[in-house]
Image: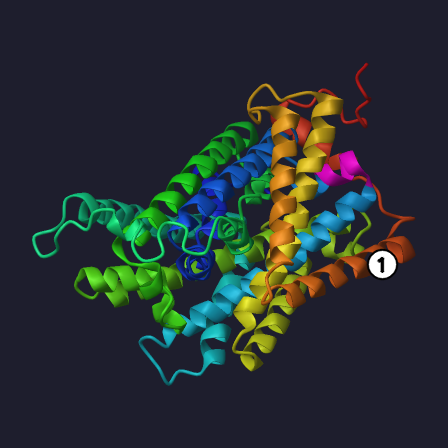
């Protein structure tokens, strides 16, 4: 594997996964639960996401190793922690990539209604796999462009929306803030709806941990991870909270949740009602790019995780082989098989996206929890990194864990999410059995990865397992 990602590309890789279907389409489900108070839900979600991204970023600055947070879990929580976190996240990336490809194929029907769903899936699935198979540099360049389109679109949406809200346009009067309190008020479904909406909101933040995974292929790991982590935290917080504020100011929650399908996207509805020429087509293109970018980023993450697992005896050894371009081809092939399985299932179930969202949320909550637990152990054993650190350290990580527990309970308090959530729990049970039956005796920490991190940054004082400080 080669270090060829710039810090700009690393930032866009993380944003590429987080700014996807979860925001452009999934936010409608959160609005239906909490109404205008969904703004508070996204603000809380942004805080939790910032804690996770900062914790993963601090560890990645100190140890820019392949496997990212999975290697950290193995180092600080033992082989079992590394096994559970990486296999869970690999399953997450496969499900997300499959869901995003189904979304891409669905968006194509906006222009070609008769186009079979499988055609779009096959065409864009091949493009995504081709980008990941060619070289990591081409992947980073394409992801930078795709994510850049989304970021610019969200910025334009926020700016235009704020102008309409407070000043108005020649053809559209200022809307003001009255929609935040009309109808049932700011909390139409009560204060508990803010908490219940978190089960959907946190799905939108999936991808913040990619900064940790891509650190092993960064040109300048310390500078790149530090810059990417900081940018990811404040950009996501700003984008999500302000964009939802604009949406709720321009349209009532009742109107936003009346229609189903593609038009139920709050972004599509707002732009259409404002009267911008060809608004529907423009937004459809943007959400298509968003889904394609997220699928691209998640295939990348899943491939690197599988490659890392093979190095530590948690997956077949043959998957550690790379091509002359530094691409782990075997790991990419395995990850693509999982995506194909998810796509096939999606073709037979109309509600597959909702089901997959519930499973993904359950899986990623556990992964994020393991990142924060690993971070607490890391700070206790190694102390804080000099180049970048989580404000508040272990105490703030503890706050993040409490937030994740609350969201986990919210998932199992939702009638539509509990069954897929239980399926994800069953997956964890299978992982536990597999680990103790087949993996435990030959799983090992890949210390060579930490040696490579030392060679790349000089920030790690020793590659030996760290001792507890007195």
Q: Does the stretch in magenta take in 221? A: no
Overall secondary structure of the magenta stretch? helix
Q: Nearest the camera: 350 or 197?
A: 197
Crowd class of label 1 (few under 14; some 14 to 19; many from 20; radius 10 Å) = some
In front of the other: 279 or 351: 351
Residue at horizontal 66%, vertical 62%? 421
Check the image and report above or below for 259 versus 249: below
Range of magenta residues: 72-78
Is residue 135 visible in the rendered image? The answer is yes
Q: Is residue 442 above or below residue 284?
A: above
Foreground of the two, 37 or 11:
37
Residue located 76% across and 27% down the image: 463
The image's colour scheme reads: rainbow
Would you name the residue on which mark 1 appears? 434
Residue 399: % across, % down: 61, 34
Report x, y in % for residue 203: 53, 54
Residue 234 relative to residue 420: left or right: left
Residue 327 visible to an observer of this rendering? no
In the displayed structure image, the side of residue 417 where residue 235 appears, left or right: left
Q: Residue furthest bottom?
A: 114
Q: What residue appears at the point 83 percent right and 55 percent down from the top-left corner? A: 432
Q: Nearer the viewer, residue 242 or 463?
A: 242
Please, what secondary structure does the residue beneath circle 1 have? helix
Residue 208 vs residue 434: left or right? left
- In which quadrant is the C terminus drawn? top right
- Quadrant location of the N terminus? top right
Residue 32 is situated, as x and y percent measured from the top left of the image, at: 43, 61
């Amino acid at each position: 594997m080669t270090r060829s990602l710039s810090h700009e590309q690393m930032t866009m890789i993380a944003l590429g996964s987080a700014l996807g279907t979860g925001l452009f389409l999934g936010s409608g489900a959160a609005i239906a639960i909490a109404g205008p108070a969904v703004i508070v839900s996204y603000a809380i979600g942004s805080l939790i996401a910032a804690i996770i991204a900062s914790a993963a970023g601090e560890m990645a600055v100190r140890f820019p190793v392949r496997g990212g947070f999975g290697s950290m879990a193995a180092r600080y929580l033992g082989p079992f922690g590394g096994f559970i976190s990486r296999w869970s996240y690999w399953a997450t990336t496969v499900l997300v990539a499959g869901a995003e490809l189904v979304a891409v194929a669905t968006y194509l029907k906006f222009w070609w209604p008769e186009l079979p769903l499988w055609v779009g899936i096959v065409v864009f699935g091949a493009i995504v796999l081709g980008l990941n198979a060619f070289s990591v540099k081409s992947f980073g360049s394409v992801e930078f462009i795709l994510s850049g389109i989304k970021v610019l679109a969200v910025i334009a949406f926020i700016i235009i929306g704020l102008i309409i809200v407070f000043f108005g346009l020649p053809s559209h009067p200022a809307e003001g803030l009255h929609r935040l309190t009309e109808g049932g008020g700011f909390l139409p479904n009560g204060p508990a709806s803010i908490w219940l909406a978190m089960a959907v909101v946190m799905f939108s933040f999936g991808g913040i941990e990619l900064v940790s995974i891509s650190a092993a292929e960064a040109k300048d790991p310390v500078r790149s991870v530090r810059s990417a982590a900081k940018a990811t935290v404040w950009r996501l917080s700003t984008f999500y909270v302000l964009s939802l504020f604009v949406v709720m100011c321009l349209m009532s929650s009742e109107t936003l949740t009346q229609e189903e399908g593609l038009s139920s996207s709050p972004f599509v509805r707002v732009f259409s009602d404002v009267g911008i020429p060809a608004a529907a087509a423009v937004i459809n293109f943007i959400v298509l790019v968003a889904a394609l970018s997220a699928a691209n980023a998640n295939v990348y993450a899943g491939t690197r995780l599988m490659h890392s697992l093979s190095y530590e005896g948690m997956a077949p050894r043959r998957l550690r082989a790379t091509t002359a371009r530094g691409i782990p081809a075997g790991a990419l092939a395995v990850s693509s098989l999982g995506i194909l399985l998810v796509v096939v299932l999606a073709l037979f179930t109309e509600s597959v996206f909702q089901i997959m969202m519930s499973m993904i949320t359950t899986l990623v909550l556990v992964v994020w929890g393991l990142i924060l637990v690993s971070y607490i152990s890391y700070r206790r054993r190694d102390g804080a990194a000099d180049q970048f650190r989580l404000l508040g350290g272990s105490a703030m990580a503890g706050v993040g864990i409490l937030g994740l527990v609350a969201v986990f309970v919210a998932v199992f308090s939702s009638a539509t999410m509990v069954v897929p959530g239980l399926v994800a729990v069953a997956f964890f049970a299978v992982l536990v059995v597999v680990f103790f039956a087949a993996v435990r005796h030959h799983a090992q920490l890949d210390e060579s990865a930490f040696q490579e991190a030392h060679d790349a940054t000089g920030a790690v004082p020793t590659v030996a397992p760290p001792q507890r400080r007195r």
